[in-house]
Image: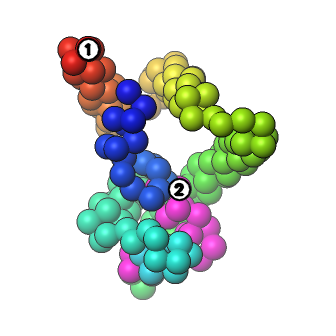
Amino acid sequence: MFEEWAQRVGSVVPRGFSRYYILKQLQKMPHTGKEIINSAVEESDGKWKPSPGLIYPLLGRLLDEGLIEETEDGKYQITDNGKTISQDLEVFNKNMKEQLDTVMKMANIGKFMAMDVLERVTILGNLLSSNVSKMTNHEVEKYKKFLQAELEKIKEMDSKK
């Protein structure tokens, strides 16, 4: 199961990282989409080259969610709401890094890491579900589609067994 997932992912950065990276860059200063792409290439020493097809739609979603806004000169800047989300991600990132550093010193963690991530995703899912009443209709629909897609993947894996 884990091997199939790892092959599907196939990127040098994990899913969802692009969103975090954009918010992190915009916390430093306003950027254009091209500047965000160029900084990603530079900071990763060319290992990650996000395409305009990834960055620009994501910028649109971040605009729709009120996490960023467009400046008069066509750059994007982070909003107060975006700063709050970004700070929450920083705390989560710090905690995960500390845990992984400790475990990496102690043992090979492949399956353990996958199970821990699954547990964290479950906790986040429960948190989202318990706050559905505070979500916009758009956010609720996105959440429903995500859950339905994940359920379909599980059904497909079960049918292959």
Image x and y of residue 94, in percent: 73, 48
Front-lying residue, 64 or 103: 103
Out of 126 and 105, give the one closest to the viewer: 105
Question: In the rendered image, which residue does mark 1 sit on?
Answer: 161
Whether 154 is among the magenta residues is: no
Q: Residue 26: within the magenta?
A: yes
Q: Residue at coordinates 26% horizontally, 14% vertically from top-left? A: 161
First in sequence, mark 1 or 2: give its number: 2
Name the residue carrying label 2.
Answer: 20
Q: Main secondary structure of the magenta part?
A: helix
Residue 40 position, x and y percent, is 49, 73
Q: Is residue 108 left or right of residue 59?
A: right
How far from the left and from the top, in percent, is residue 74?
39, 81
Q: Dot 1 surroundings within 10 Å: few (below 14), some, or many (20 or more)?
A: few
Dot in front, 1 or 2: 1
Question: Does 19 sit above or below residue 139?
Answer: below
Residue name at image x 75 percent, y 46 percent: 101
The amino acid sitting under disc 1 is Lys
| Point 52% across, 62% down: residue | 21
Q: How many marks?
A: 2
Does residue 59 appear left or right of residue 20 in this picture? left
Which range of residues does the magenta coloring cover? 19-34
In this rendering, is residue 21 above or below 35?
Answer: above
Q: Say whether residue 64 is visible.
A: no
Residue 1 visible to the viewer: yes
- Depth order, front residue of 33/155: 155
Q: Residues within 10 Å of mark 2 (few under 14, many from 20)?
A: few
